[in-house]
Image (cartoon, rainbow, N blue to C red):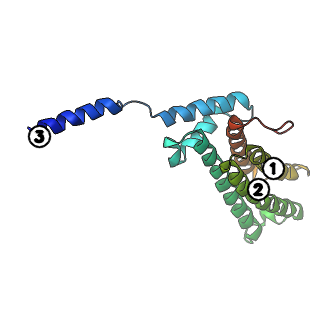
């Protein structure tokens, strides 16, 4: 008799709290797609596919709310900045490849290294600002990260015939920063003249 009561109680609890269909889309999955649709619609620098692919690459995104997606986008940007800075260091130290012996290219790489070093510090501050709901300051700091990637890439273009070894990485930094800015701006409108 007690097992029948236990089964009955179990069924009532399932009905009370709801049973999700095994094939149902988790709410966070829908939130990622909804967020990315808004980001792509509001920012011509962002594509829906880039946004979805980037956010879904983070395991925590599967159960995240909008604020958590913002933190995830900022952390993805930080990982990209750190990896790019490490790559630039590798290019500067690589003595076997003479591809980057040109003084102009080395100068550009050194400039990019400094830009990425500063961007990492700015992003660390932006994450703290975002977590404390200081969205305006987070916006300004992430905007500076976006500018750093563009400045780095533009440095190589100043001399004819020089191609940047960082084009893909700078592009990723730019787009990840734009994604983070879009999510920040969903919480708080940007200050006038920013992004």
**In front: mark 1 or mark 3?**
3
Mark 2 → mark 1, Cα distance in angstroms: 8 Å
Q: Nearer the viewer, residue 83 or 121?
A: 121
In which quadrant is the N terminus drawn? Answer: top left
Label number found at residue 188:
none
- SS for callout 3: helix
Q: Which mark is residue 144?
A: 1
Residue 22 in view here: no
Residue visible at 70% across and 41% down in the picture: 184
How crowded is the residue under tag 1: few (<14 C-alpha within 10 Å), some, or many (20+)?
some
Q: Residue furthest left?
A: 1
- How many tags in the picture? 3
* Residue at 65 percent of width and 50 percent of height: 131
Residue on which the image places disc 3: 2
| Cβ atoms under marks 2 and 1 closer than 8 Å | yes
Q: Nearer the viewer, residue 156 or 12?
A: 12
Question: Closer to the N terminus: mark 2 or mark 3?
Answer: 3
Quadrant for the C terminus in the image: top right
Q: Point out residue 138 in the picture as x, y percentages from the top left corner.
A: 74, 48
Q: What residue lies at 23% left-to-right and 32% top-to-bottom?
A: 11
Q: Which residue is mark 2?
A: 122
Quarter residue 93 falls in: bottom right
Q: Earlier in the sequence, mark 2 or mark 1?
A: 2
SS at circle 1: helix
């Amino acid at each position: 008799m007690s097992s029948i009561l236990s089964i009955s109680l179990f069924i009532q609890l399932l009905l009370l709290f709801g049973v999700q269909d095994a094939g149902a889309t988790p709410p966070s999955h829908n939130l990622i797609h909804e967020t990315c649709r808004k980001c792509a619609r509001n920012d011509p620098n962002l594509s829906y596919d880039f946004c979805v692919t980037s956010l879904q690459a983070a395991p925590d995104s599967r159960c995240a709310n909008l604020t958590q997606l913002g933190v995830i986008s900022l952390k993805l940007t930080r990982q990209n900045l750190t990896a790019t800075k490490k790559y630039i260091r590798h290019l500067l130290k690589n003595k076997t490849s003479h591809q980057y012996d040109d003084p102009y290219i080395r100068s550009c790489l050194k400039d990019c290294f400094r830009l990425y070093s500063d961007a990492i510090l700015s992003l660390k501050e932006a994450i703290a600002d975002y977590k404390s709901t200081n969205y305006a300051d987070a916006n300004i700091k992430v905007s500076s990260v976006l500018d750093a990637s563009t400045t780095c890439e533009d440095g190589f273009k100043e001399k004819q015939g020089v191609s940047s070894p960082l084009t893909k990485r700078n592009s990723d930094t730019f787009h990840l920063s734009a994604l983070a800015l879009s999510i920040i701006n969903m919480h708080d409108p940007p200050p006038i003249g920013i992004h």
